Image (cartoon, coloured by chain):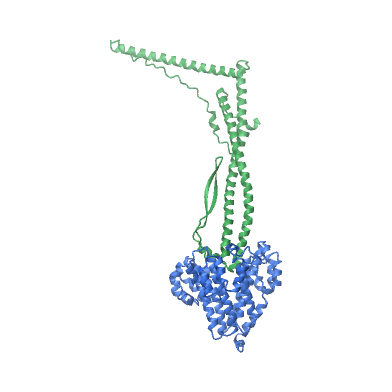
Amino acid sequence: MSGAVGREAVFPTRQSLGLMKNKLKGAEIGHSLLKRKSEALTKRFRDITRRIDEAKQKMGRVMQIAAFSLAEVSYAVGGDIGYQIQESAKQARFRVRTKQENISGVLLPTFESYTQEGVNDFGLTGLGKGGQQIQRCRETYARAVETLVELASLQTAFLILDEVIKVVNRRVNAIEHVIIPRTENTIKCLYRLLRVSLAQANHSEDINSELDELDREEFYRLKKVSGKKKRDVAAADAEILAARQKAEEEQAANPNAPAATATATAPAILAEEETTDVLGEQEDNDVIF
Amino acid sequence: MEGLFFNVNGGYVEGIVRGYRNSLLSSQNYSNLTQCETIDDVKLQLAPSYGDFLASLSPNPSTSDLASRMTDKLVAEFKYLIAQATGSSAKFLEYMTYGYMIDNIALLITGTLHERDTRELLERCHPLGWFETLPVLCVATNIEELYNSVLIETPLAAYFKGSLSHQDLDELNIEIVRNTLYKNYLEDFYNFINTHPDFSGTPTQDVMAEILQFEADRRSINITLNSFGTELSKLERRKLYPEFGKLYPEGSLMLSRAEDVEGVALAVSAVADYKAFFDAVGLSQGGGGLGGMGGGPADGKSLEDLFYQKEMDLSKLVFTRQFTPAVVYAWMKLKEQEIRNVTWISECIAQNQKERIGNFISVF
């Protein structure tokens, strides 16, 4: 496993070890959250699949009845009334409005059908004969379209959920099989490397305390360096000051001139330990590979 | 006496029609049709009567294709008849086509009102309602022009005159226009067969008067039933009733006042036939209501079905008469019913709804 996953390129310091540990913890929390989301979505997905199945069967029946009622109309009227109805329909009686439903952060559009009462554009069609059949046929078709709308909203939800579930599962798998092993691997590697370098120094077994000591040594070393730098700067300042005083004395016999007081302000130590920027390349672009 | 010279002019046409009548499907044919599994089987069963007209259909045709081919045959036969007819018989046959013309004109008016390209609509027109000046209707781009310069030229001009202005065409629902025209047409036809010297006192007058009266009553009843729940006012409704028939005038008046199905049942109760229909479908009891139409009641017959049945019976009786062009009218109605029947049967087969396949009207 470790061979396949590899490890991240970090310098073997204790600090990066700490970072890695944090990262591992974060990855585990994220993993469990995403897993739960995926489960919630999958549950919903199954529910929708079942309802699609029902709706499709219902649609089959309803469409059959509707088509048959159209046959009844053509029998009763004895001709084609399609054109006349198309022309006389001006306003939609059957309308659809959309809403959004939120399922664990995924927005699903749902369609809802309603009939606009009072719109009856072809109420007089078939006045001479077949009027009842036409009205009944219209009602049957309204029911058929209702089923279609229901099916459409389910199908849309189905497609969107399918996509989202895929993405979430990909993330879950990426975290489970790549990020976590790689981070673990890195941590192991760091331990091993650090242990090796320590073993060379003194053969201690207690790694953490050794690491701490190593850190303290490093800190002390840095402090020492900065102390030395400070001293050097102070010496240089004093030299410049002395030279200036000497020049002034030579110019004027006025020895009491107030020297630019020890402006030798201690230059800031701050050779800030540069933190290793190894994490830069880990910006989370992992989810899709 | 009236038959003495009929055959000089009308004998050939009558003979042809009686021949046509024999090719109408019998109940034996229908029972064969209902056994069919596919539309192809239906096509095969229809081959003896429809032959070449169905030959060019693709395998497993749609029911509408089938129906349109059958209509083609009807049209071809009728055109032959009208070409052979002379004198008053020819006039009579022309009257028969006016009903289809009204439908065609209503179609074109609808197209003009919505500013569609009316040329496309010509294909949708019923071929029997075709007249020479029909394509001219497409020239008109607005309704006023249509009314003033084009409709005047059509055979239907007389039906527009006096009852519809061009504003009416614009404002009224096209269905009201259509039914007004139809009312005028029925009245005119009725007047024609009663007053024309060639027809008055002949069997033609007897049978046609009965058929047209029935047609008028049926329209009145249907209009009344279908207008419930729409914005059609009672006054407008009354204007659409043809002013003759068994229901006229008392029944018509009561119909115009009817507010529900019971009211209609009450209005028609004076005529035994119609009362029987309403009783059969259970509308006069108050239990049926509009929802009972066509679907539920008793033997699965709706009021429309009963009306069609009655129409077919009347048409069948016409063939017992001789020396009359009314047989053409009867044959046409029978043929149309046959096309509807076959369409219904093939629709049931295509949609696998065999349980209601018997819901057609077989005459012979």
Q: Nearer the viewer, residue A134 or A170?
A: A134
The colour applied to the residues of chain B in this rendering is: blue
Note whether B238 is above or below A56 in the view shown: below
Residue A176 in the image: state x and y as whole percent: 62, 34
Compared with residue B319, is residue A94 higher up or lower down, i.e. above or below? above
Instruction: Note whether residue A67 is visible.
Output: yes
Asked whether A78 or B82 is in front, the reply is A78
Give the residue at the far left of this rendering.
Answer: A253
Q: Residue at x 64, y 50 (%)?
A: A53
Q: Quadrant of the C terminus of chain B?
A: bottom right
Tell me if residue B26 comes above or below residue A209 in the rendering: below
Is residue B125 in view? no
| Quadrant of the rendered image containing residue A68 | bottom right
Give how far across and how far down residue A92 sits, in percent.
51, 57
Q: Is residue A55 above or below residue B64?
A: above
> How many labels sit on residues?
0
Report the quarter where the N terminus of chain B lies. Answer: bottom right
Question: Picture coordinates of residue A101 (x, y %)?
Answer: 54, 44
Residue occupying the point 53% across, 83% down: B195
**How far across and down, in percent of the image, does residue A116 sit?**
51, 56
Chain in green in the render: A
In the figure, residue B144 lies in which quadrant? bottom left
**Quarter location, residue A243:** top left
